[in-house]
Image (cartoon, grey):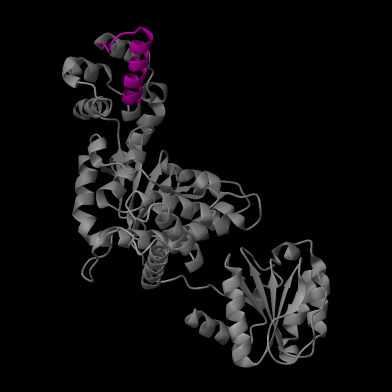
Amino acid sequence: MKNDIHDLGLVIDAGTPIIVIESYDELRVLEMMTRLAMNRGLVLFTWSVTEGLNRLGFGHGSDNEAITEPDDVLAHIKKETVPSLFVLCDFHPFLQPNEHRNIRLLKDIALQHSQLRHTVVLLSHALDLPPELKRLGAHFELSLPTDEQLLAMVREEANNWSKKNLGRRVKTDSKTLDKLVSNLRGLSLNEARQLTRGAIFDDGAITVDDLPEVNKAKFSLMDMEGVLSFEYETAHFSEVGGLSAFKAWLSQRRTAFLQPSEQQDIPKGVMLLGVQGGGKSLAAKAVAGMWGIPLLKMDFGALYNKYIGETERNIREALKLADVMSPCVLWMDEIEKGIAVGRSDDGTSKRILGTLLTWMAERKKAVFVVATSNDITQLPPELIRKGRLDEIFFVDLPDAEVRREIFGIHFNKRSIESESYDLDTLVELTNGFSGSEIEQVIVGALYSAKASDELLQQSHLEKNIQSTSPLSVVMAEDIAMLRNWAESRTVQAQ
């Protein structure tokens, strides 16, 4: 907090009339403002629509005022002659485009800063200044606790639990403790403390079983509105049929990503292009499983928001959280849905693309991007050029050898003895099937066997194959075009 107080003091001393602080930790910000007011001998006022205007600082100034209306408090600040700090809590609803009077009053205060010497701090969970005020204000971002501070907090909570439980020690190990600290990144100290207590207090232990629940609670707490989710079950490449070239490529870069050095550039990411159901999503999950790091999934469908500016905020917050969670894999599923060329949405897609390209070019954190797409021709060329991503892999329909492997994987998952079936025939009959279509053949055959009160037979499998129209037939022309495009432009993942 000391660095935040120092840096915020510099912003105030520089004569910034309006400061925007976006934070859920209102008490922490008010404590910071109180210390700043004390250090500078200023009067500190806070305002909310429920409590009105209240004086919290030190020095000379007006007594508490029963002012609850937003335009009244701004008019009061404009008339106040003693230089003061004013913290307006949750003022964002009163700066909407139709709130012309409030915007103008705040602008008057800012333009008269050289005479009034007031600093207005707008404290909300989320707030964008109206265009009229953007050049008169500045955003101040609170720092997040370091790993050392998080670890100290976890130990403090463990000691507190021990004191309340007759000196019993909290059971854990250093590896699990390090993972817990890593998973708490991106939260304020109070939020991290809340989740740590939940992990400790139920059984007096911090185990690997607690970590998924901590992450689930964390993403719920951060309210990413479905834009970014934490994937708890990451696949192993043993669950992915084929993709031998992609697996080898990843194996060569694992150390460079997890243990970066000055001699090697850190891997940036890949684009997985291919037929629907070909295993792109499973491969994306398997990258995180192979490297043993968290997997975050960005949902471009949930990214768009009906409120002006919220879509851009969503992607900024998502990318910021990915940086905080590093090292991690950021899976951008069906990316063409969010930034397709020619999309008509008042320029939102272009702004999203600009934000994404800037982040990809400037990021320093270990965030490996896995973007999946069914139609790369819809994507802007500046996104897929070398330098943004390391490689484009084409995930084609599985050949005979890979189809045999896929049958084996799904038989094993369901404890079915593959030796009991004629795999050669099944592999031949499923020519042109995707991996997901082969899985559904097995699922459907099991349903058929269950309905007939029989064990799974070869005939059940063959009948389900014959009743399936694979995408390679239904969308033959589209898949032929996709293959033709990818032939000289991508690396085969198989």
- Which residue reaches farthest left? 419
Does residue 14 appear anywhere in the picture?
A: no
Relative vertical location of residue 60 with respect to residue 342 in this rendering, above or below: below
- Residue 438 drawn in magenta: yes
Does residue 190 appear anywhere in the picture?
A: yes
Relative vertical location of residue 455 with respect to residue 146 in this rendering, above or below: above
- Tell me where residue 233 sits by quadrant: top left
Q: Which residues are magenta?
A: 437-457
Residue 126: give x, y in percent of width and height: 62, 63
Picture quarter with the C terminus: top left
- 177 horizontally vs 427: left or right: right
- Tell me where residue 180 sits by quadrant: bottom left
Foreground: 334 or 342? 334
Relative vertical location of residue 134 with respect to residue 117 in this rendering, above or below: above
- Which residue reaches farthest top? 452
Residue 365: give x, y in percent of width and height: 36, 65
- Residue 493 drawn in magenta: no
Foreground: 50 or 412? 50
- 423 horizontally vs 432: left or right: left
Relative vertical location of residue 58 with respect to residue 313 in this rendering, above or below: below
Q: Residue at x 80, y 82 (%)?
A: 78
Residue 56: give x, y in percent of width and height: 69, 81
Report the number of discs.
0
- Which residue reaches farthest front? 166
Residue 235: give x, y in percent of width and height: 30, 41
Query: What secondary structure do most residues of the magenta stretch adopt?
Result: helix
Q: Residue at x 36, y 7 (%)?
A: 452
